Image (cartoon, helix red, strand yellow):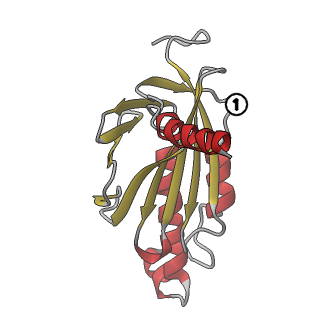
Amino acid sequence: MKLRSLAVAATLVLLPALGSAAPPDFTGSWRLDPKRSDDPHARINDSAGPAQVKGGGTSPLTILSQSGTKASVERVELRERLMHIADQVEKLEVVQGEGDIKLYHGDEIARTFYFGREHIREDSQGGKLKCNLRWEGTELVLDEKGERGRHVVERFKLDAAQGVLVEDFHMEDRLLEKPLDLRLVYVREGADGLKP
């Protein structure tokens, strides 16, 4: 019995040490590996639907005057914004600090998230997003909630064995025809023949 108590005590002492390992560091310049990634444009097209307004005419006045077309116009606008973002995912720059992480997609998209506290940021259209950043084991989770049912969850994990950073993106929005799920695989610049 005494030996069992010692084993339990030793396990309790070791658990905090095992759990306090430093999280992975995603800092660096990354390039999209299109062969291992989903096609963002195809996924957006599938999730957001066609580029045309359903039931609309050719004039903006005609489109807006028809019943139920406002949501369709908003859906097409969201689709266009998402397609523009998809044009920026080829490059990813990550700067990870103790209290925050900065993500730069392409030349236009810059976002900062803070560990340990909810914060508000604006999306590209000025909408307010409540943001949470947390670690789930070695996986970094960015969770954003906005108005009208928008919910975005991004999960980043470093696969050191393959030398890649994987981003799993999930977006729900009342304007989408179905949730958008996207997997992007990044290779560190300079690796696998990619130039910095």
Q: Residues within 10 Å of mark 1 (few under 14, many from 20)?
A: few
Give percent across and percent down for residue 12. 53, 43
Query: Is 63 left or right of 180, judged from the image as shown?
Result: left
Q: Quadrant of the C terminus?
A: top left
In the rendered image, is residue 67 in sight?
yes
Is residue 60 left or right of 39 when viewed as pictured? left
Q: Residue furthest front?
A: 2
Q: Quadrant of residue 119?
A: bottom left
Residue 46 horizontal/vertical position (percent): 69, 57
Report if residue 50 is visible in the image. no
- Above or below, 30 against 97 in this view is above
For image coordinates 55% across by 87% down, the residue present is 68
Q: Amino acid at mark 1?
A: Arg
Say which of 62 and 178 sits in front.
178
Q: Estimate the x, y position of residue 5 in percent, counting from the top left.
A: 61, 45
Q: Could you tell me residue 150's position as x and y percent?
A: 48, 68
- Left or right of 142? Residue 160 is right
| Residue topped by disc 1 | 36
Q: How many marks?
A: 1
Question: Is 88 located above or below residue 66 in the figure?
Answer: above
Query: Is 3 or 10 nearer to us in this picture?
Result: 3
The structure residue drawn at horizontal position 32% and vertical position 60%, both measured from the top left corner, is 118
11 or 47: nearer the viewer: 11
Disc 1 is placed on an element classified as loop
Above or below: residue 18 compared with residue 48: above
Extreme residue toward the bottom, this view: 67
